Amino acid sequence: MATIQAPRGMRDILPGEVERWQALEARIHDLAARHGFREIRTPVVEHTEVFQRTVGEATDMVEKEMYTFTDRGGRSLSLRPEGTAAVMRAYLEHGLRQQPQPARLYYIAPMFRYDRPQKGRYRQHTQFGAEVIGSAHPAADAEVLVLPIRLMQSLGLTEIEVRLNSVGDAVCRPRFLEALRAYLRPRAAELCEDCRRRLERNPLRVLDCKREGCHRIAQGAPSSIDHLCEACAAHLEGVRRQFDLLGVPYRLDPSIVRGLDYYTRTAVEVFSGRLGAQNAMFGGGRYDGLAEQLGGPPTPGVGFGFGMDRLLLALDGEGGAPAADRQVQVMVVTIGPAAASRGVQVADRLRGAGLRVETDLLGRDLRAQLKHADRVGVRYAVLLGDDELRSGVVILREMASGEQASVPEEGAAAALAARLAAPPAAGKGRWR
Ligand code: HAM
């Protein structure tokens, strides 16, 4: 019988790779704290309408990419395809507006999209996202959007291309959409089937259609920036000023309309030269109408979502995200059944003292245990036989040099800690 594999587009992250994730996550928690953001965790599933109403019925995400199912109680639930609507749902549900405003929230969470998998695009991916909810000020846009830029810079990713646009608001968007329809109608025959269907209902989606023909037509389309009302134009100016204050280089790009319907005003996408076709590192923007779409009071918000899988791809082969040091340090090696029993207690005590310790679980003989210690890469073995049991000592063996020293059992943790604090010896005389 063939062995079962993980679902297509979903990956296992094995030991060896997982350390890079842990290091990146630690860096993100640290960065977010320095910027005054606090973590929020929402369920992996939401009521389907959370996304239907906000991301939009006529978007690829809702039409084609959601993992939607009916639970045993007959409710329609969906695996979270994105974080913003879920975070806003939680903000409204728990009355977070009663707390100091704006709320500054971030998450590191898996997202699920039934898309065609390729390098950098998965059916389960993980996003680092942050949202500032409760401020309509352009400083909020820059405040949250600078976070992922600082993250990339701190990781040595300097080829960053920030593309900024404004998609307007409820005042000016209708005018822009009318101009867009007027441009698209005579070209409808050249559009793909999806776009022809969306032309009247949601013409903005034509602008981010990935198909070649639609993309060509989109390039000549009227731009939202030319149709902004006064307030939206002033907001865009404000964001640009804030970016300048922070030294964030950016380019105005009217083609950035984002694939989700909830955006108002600011829309941003950031690219890295290090990635291929799937080169959007993060995307985000403002969503001042989202709270109302979920039945809440008018509440402005702005944020971003950063593809962590893509970030790690871009860093591949680089020292950018240093792996956290979780390497096992010590192997307890025992000879004979009495020593094996004592070894269990010795290991337990060493672990209690903060050391990273492994023991033999296969009943190996001395030689095989030492060979295993070598393969695992511990710096020290703690040797324990009947002689040592009788005299209450253990032998510390430095694996690289083969040097051994006998120390009282109760002093072993301190002796090991002191030795481990010193730089490792050169790799001579390894056990064979
Ligand atoms: P999004 O542009 O759909 O925005 O996704 C954000 C980021 O997630 C992308 O720039 C990309 O790096 C990563 N990403 C998206 N899909 C995949 C995939 N299939 N495989 C790997 N990585 C992927 C949002 O989700 C919004 N919620 C962002 C936001 C937050 N806007 C305001 N606040």
Image: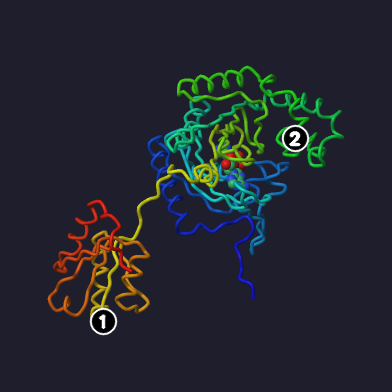
Label drawn at residue 427:
none
Label drawn at residue 336:
1
Secondary structure of the residue carrying numbered label 2 = helix
Q: Which residue appears at 72% of the width and 39% of the height?
A: 210
The vertical placement of 343 against 428, above or below, is below
Q: Is residue 386 left or right of residue 143?
A: left
Q: Is mark 1 within 8 Å of ligand 1?
A: no
| Image coords of residue 288 (percent x, y) | 59, 32
**Circles 1 and 2 in contact, beta carbons < 8 Å:** no
Labels 1, 2: front one = 1
Secondary structure of the residue carrying numbered label 1 = loop
Front-lying residue, 25 or 183: 25
Q: Which residue appears at 57% of the width and 32% of the height?
A: 285
| Image coords of residue 2 (percent x, y) | 64, 72
Q: Quadrant of the N terminus?
A: bottom right
Q: Tag 2: residue type?
A: Val
**Furthest residue toward bottom:** 337
Q: Is residue 71 left or right of residue 426?
A: right
The vertical placement of 280 against 184, above or below, is below
The vertical placement of 13 against 362, above or below, is above
Q: Tell me which label, 1 or 2, sits earlier in the chain.
A: 2
The vertical placement of 330 against 158, above or below, is below
| Image coords of residue 427 (percent x, y) | 30, 57
Q: Is residue 14 left or right of residue 203?
A: left
Q: Which residue is mark 2?
A: 206
Q: Tag 1: residue type?
A: Gly
